[in-house]
Amino acid sequence: MEETLKQILVELKEVRSNVNGLTQGQKEMRSDINDLTQGQKEMRSDIIDLAQSQKEMRSDITDLTQGQKEMRSDITDLTQGQKKMRSDINDLKHGQKRLEAGLERLQKNIVVSISEYTEKIVDYVDDKTEALNKRVYQVETDLQRLSKQ
């Protein structure tokens, strides 16, 4: 009986050792579960941060897209303005050519007009000179007749 009790005691020690081992294993499992839970919480936080960053990036992409559309509109406006300026420049060049042609005609007309006017002055002076010469001749003739009498 003593042997049976020793054997029971040995078996109880083994059971106690196994229970202690199980308890230790359970504690280690609880620690591992706590670590996994903490890791899961950190991953959830990281996922939330990534989702927030993704939302911010989408907002930035939307802003960039809007800015790009505005730039395209500005470029279109600038292109239209440039076309209008080219048209205006062409109009100015044509106007300048017309002015130059008109100025050239005016210069020629001035020369012709001055020459015609000069001719008229010369003719007028010649006519007046001739009339004056005739009067002078008449006066001289009259003086000679009077002086002969």
Image (tube, grey):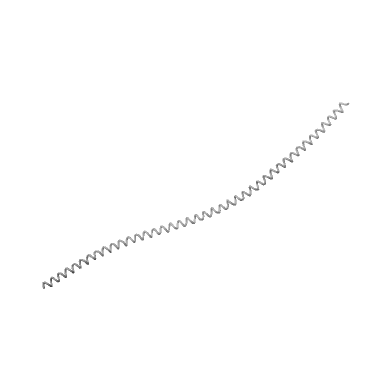
- Left or right, residue 97 beside residue 25: right
Indicate the quadrant where residue 7 lies.
Answer: bottom left
Which residue is more in the foreground, 15 or 145? Answer: 15
- Left or right, residue 125 beside residue 6: right
Q: Residue furthest right?
A: 149
Quadrant the N terminus occupies: bottom left
Q: How many marks?
A: 0
Indicate the quadrant where residue 127 lies.
Answer: top right
Q: Position of residue 86 (x, y in %)?
A: 58, 51
Q: Position of residue 99 (x, y in %)?
A: 65, 46
Quadrant the C terminus occupies: top right
Q: Position of residue 27 (x, y in %)?
A: 24, 64
Q: Position of residue 72 (x, y in %)?
A: 51, 56
- Left or right, residue 107 beside residue 81: right
**Is 12 placed above or below 105 here?**
below
**Is 101 placed above or below 20 here?**
above
**Is 124 placed above or below 90 here?**
above
- Left or right, residue 26 beside residue 87: left
Q: Residue furthest left?
A: 2
